[in-house]
Image (tube, rainbow, N blue to C red):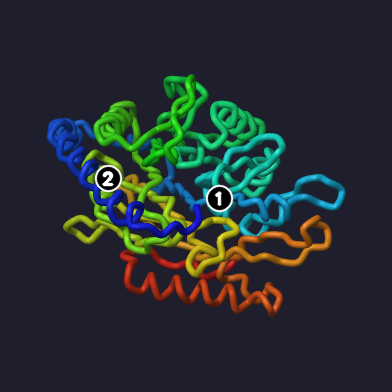
Amino acid sequence: MEFKRGIWRYVVLPELVCSGIVLGFAIGFLLFEPLMSAREENRVEVAVSDELPERQHLTLIFTGDLMQHLPQVYAAQQQNDSMDYTSCFSRLKGYFSSADFVVANLETTLGEPPYSGYPQFRSPTVLAGAMRQAGIDVAALANNHICDRGGNGIRSTLDALDRAGIRHTGAWADTVPADNHPLWLEKGPFRVALFNYTYGTNGIPVPRGCFVNGIDTIRMGHDIVEARQNGASHVIVFLHWGNEYEAVPNRVQRSLSDFCRRAGAEIVIGSHPHVVQSLETVKDSLGRIVGMTAYSLGNFVSNQRQPGTDGGISVRIGLTLSEKTNKTEYIPEYLIHWTAIMKDHKSRSGHRYEIIPAYAEETLPENLRPGLNRFVERTRRYMSRYNSGFREITCGF
């Protein structure tokens, strides 16, 4: 996940990939145009009972890349040899509690020692418990590091998440994704289908007996249409895509986002670039938001410290269903947060990692505030140009 500058990776290879994928889009559109048209006719309307309140609410939060470089693992090791990640997420518990579901991109495998960082990650299983304690409900696993430790790594990751009570989607210790595809997020009249796909697995073959969702427009189109037929009130697609460290979405991302919306998804969430990319909303002829894309949420937590990689955003999306119109009103928001490395005598490394929301500046030691402020100001400048329809969250929880 580190910078690797080279003509092959950043010029030749992306062009080859873009050409191939764009051709795939064309084929996908030809095959799925009838299904997409039929979707409008067969779109599932949410039935609202007379006994329900006039307006029903659902709130979702999505975070970016939850990474574990070795310095983070060492920082979690305490003087008594136990592992403790509690402080990493502690400042976000109130924020997470404002949502019905919190979804994070888990970009590491979980298992037993020996642990490892880049380029093939294996992190302590107790990380899953800390995630759940903080309020994370769902782990998206379709990313380029899910196969880092082979089939055993996938199975141990799923086991750790299951023990912690975290639901997951995108990767399976089975050849057929029978469960959690889609992963259903349900509350009252809301029945939300969540899909998760990745561009690849760093050239590592998916282990025999396992399955990882790859980006495939033909399959994705089928998945979305089938979810609608199975009663989905809304569809969300979480994609691991794009070019690392590039602040502007590429043409493949934009084409995929458009494809997902045409197929029937209202919300598209992106991860992988490790920097924040643009936020966009789609409006109907009356100016009402009917869909949105967050191209990249950046890093949720990592050891990366290059400008733009030392933090990220999470998006909070409020959905309100009106009984009178049976239409959904969306309130899209984003929270800027930065990863602080703080001194900690309880840690064997002498440090700990904490995710600091932008509104918590006054709680930081004086020497750490400039780092937070630089990241926040950088992100706000970016959002002033590349944000359409999302509102920044600036108050505490």
The residue at 30%/58% (across/down) is 281
Q: Residue 66 — which label?
A: 1
Residue 214: x and y in percent read 37, 35
Specify few, some or many for label 2: CA neighbours under 10 Å numbering under 14, 14-19, or 20 or more: few
Residue nearer the viewer, 49 or 266: 266
Residue 23: x and y in percent read 17, 41
Residue 113: x and y in percent read 72, 37
| In this picture, residue 338 sits left or right of residue 226 | right
- Does residue 192 appear in this view? no
Q: Residue 1 — which label?
A: none
Residue nearer the viewer, 70 or 63: 70
Q: Secondary structure at mark 1?
A: strand
Q: Amino acid at mark 1?
A: Leu
Q: Is residue 213 above or below residue 94?
A: above
Q: Quadrant of the C terminus?
A: bottom right
Q: Secondary structure at mark 2?
A: helix
Say which residue label 2 marks.
17
Q: Hey, which residue is sitting farthest right in the picture?
A: 80
Q: Amino acid at mark 2?
A: Val
